[in-house]
Image: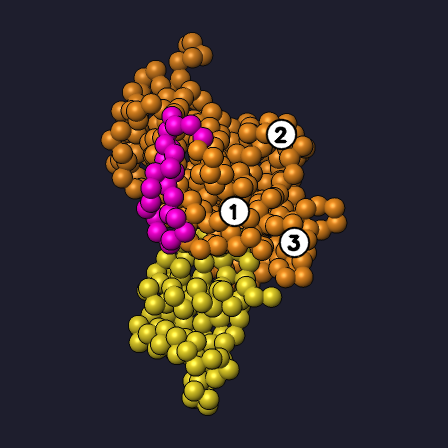
Chain colours: A yellow, B orange
Amino acid sequence: MGGNGLRIEFRRSGGFAGLTIGTEVDTGELPPEEARVFERLAESLERSGVGDSPPPGKPDRFQYELTITRGGKSRRFQLAEQELTPEARELVNLLVERARRP
Amino acid sequence: MCRSCSIYCIVPPVVFEQIAKNGNAEQREWAIETVSRDHSLRVARIQNSLLRGTGPIRADALAASDPGQPKRTVYDAKNLEQVTGEVVRAEGGPAVGDAAADEAFDGLGATYTLWYDVYQRDSIDDSGLPLDAIVHYGDRYDNAFWDGQRMVFGDGDGELFNRFTVALDVIGHELAHGVVETTANLNYWQQSGALNEHVADVFGSLVKQYKEGESAEQADWLIGAGLLTDKVEGTGDQPAALRSMAAPGTAFDDDVLGKDPQPDHMDKFVQTTQDNGGVHINSGIPNKAFHSVALELGGNAWEKAGAIWYSALRDPRVKPTARFLTFAKATGRAANRLYGDGSAEAKTVANGWKAVGIKI
């Protein structure tokens, strides 16, 4: 992947606890197989046409903010837990898993 | 002339129902003011249906089957992110030995009991809504929520969070979101969202206080005590919790989680776009006001302070976009209505808000 990689900055806020967690992923630094998963899911999100504006909040659900940077261009997505597509949910779950690592 | 001859002697309940359905805002308000002077169960039920706002009034609002009895069902999502599953415990059934299922069942019961015993509200919608809960939702899912129809509980990741059924005030908090949805229906964004959170914390805490028989003085006023694992550090000798209504900003102070960000005064109001505009952060301000009022009124917080707040929640002037000041004023009106104009209770309410920088 090398220089063709993409970078994802991720933040989860809200939830009952109201705590924010976050992580950053640079697919260029990941094993190829893992990198391909992130790239496939990121592309799916970019094509989905959602996330340009903050979705209406629902009590104690999570809110997600993802900034995807490729080729020097960044795009920000704002997503609500209750409105995730299956692919976005998979992406978010992977990022939450990484954010939890000490 | 007889003192029992209130307006109810001459105005049949059906008229109030008609006002609820067809009246304009002023007429609704008159009906609400009028019924608020009677505290009988029947009248409370009429009042609750009146105050449900402009939404449809259920035909059975006055005739729910078995009022006073919760109708609980607990489902097991088996660690999938789904809101269906196998029924693991239903009303009348024995404990099943699954801590999450049994705690959810008992918590739904304790929550129902507070609302029914103290505020004569028959379940979330005051029409006997069955209480459903999903447990073991998702994989190490760090959350619990009311999705508009049911309670959903995650098991927590075990690192920071224990299972979400472990704290009764969490269950009470979530179901209170359901009550808010069927009353003031506060938008979950910025100040109205923080009020939504605040009301959920108030009644979540009151569910626990009522169950434990704790006075305002005795209660710990913590939200989510026991929910965070032993690895998370509290402040001083206090074990970690998620929020402190008595001292917002002191619930936790931890290497991983950071420090509790809640303000306790309008001077420290936090502007942010995260967390729906800081709904779990700025709720510290009205939380502190409620705590001050409850402590100054003394005795059990669910009695006077809780009644005032519940009445304010159903004030027609508290719209979905309400800000702190609007709600604070509604609590002042409620105190005047319930305990008399210029009463000690009304002054206490005003003082509680003043202490957090809100003048009503």
Which mark is first along the chain, 3 or 1? 1
Question: Which residue shows up at 58% across the image and 32% down it?
Answer: B209
Measuring from the top left, give residue B119's x and y in whole percent: 46, 28
Q: Amino acid at mark 2?
A: Glu
Which mark is first along the chain, 2 or 3? 2
Q: Amino acid at mark 1?
A: Arg
Real-space Cα separation, disc 1 to disc 3, in angstroms: 15 Å
Of residues B286 and A92, the one nearer the viewer is A92
Question: Which residue shows up at 28% across the image and 35% down it?
Answer: B57
Real-space Cα separation, disc 1 to disc 2, in angstroms: 24 Å
Extreme residue in the right direction: B236
Which mark is first along the chain, 2 or 1? 1
Q: Amino acid at mark 3?
A: Lys
Q: Which residues are magenta?
A: B72-95
Q: Which mark is residue B214?
A: 2
Q: Are marks 3 and 2 on the same chain?
A: yes
Q: Which mark is residue B231?
A: 3
Of residues B123 and B319, the one nearer the viewer is B123
Could you tell me which quadrant the N terminus of chain B lies in? Answer: top left
Measuring from the top left, give residue B342's x and y in whole percent: 59, 31
Q: Is residue B118 above or below residue A67?
A: above
Q: Nearer the viewer, mark 3 or mark 2?
A: 3
Residue B206 seen: no
Of residues B87 and B187, the one nearer the viewer is B87
Q: Nearer the viewer, mark 1 or mark 2?
A: 1
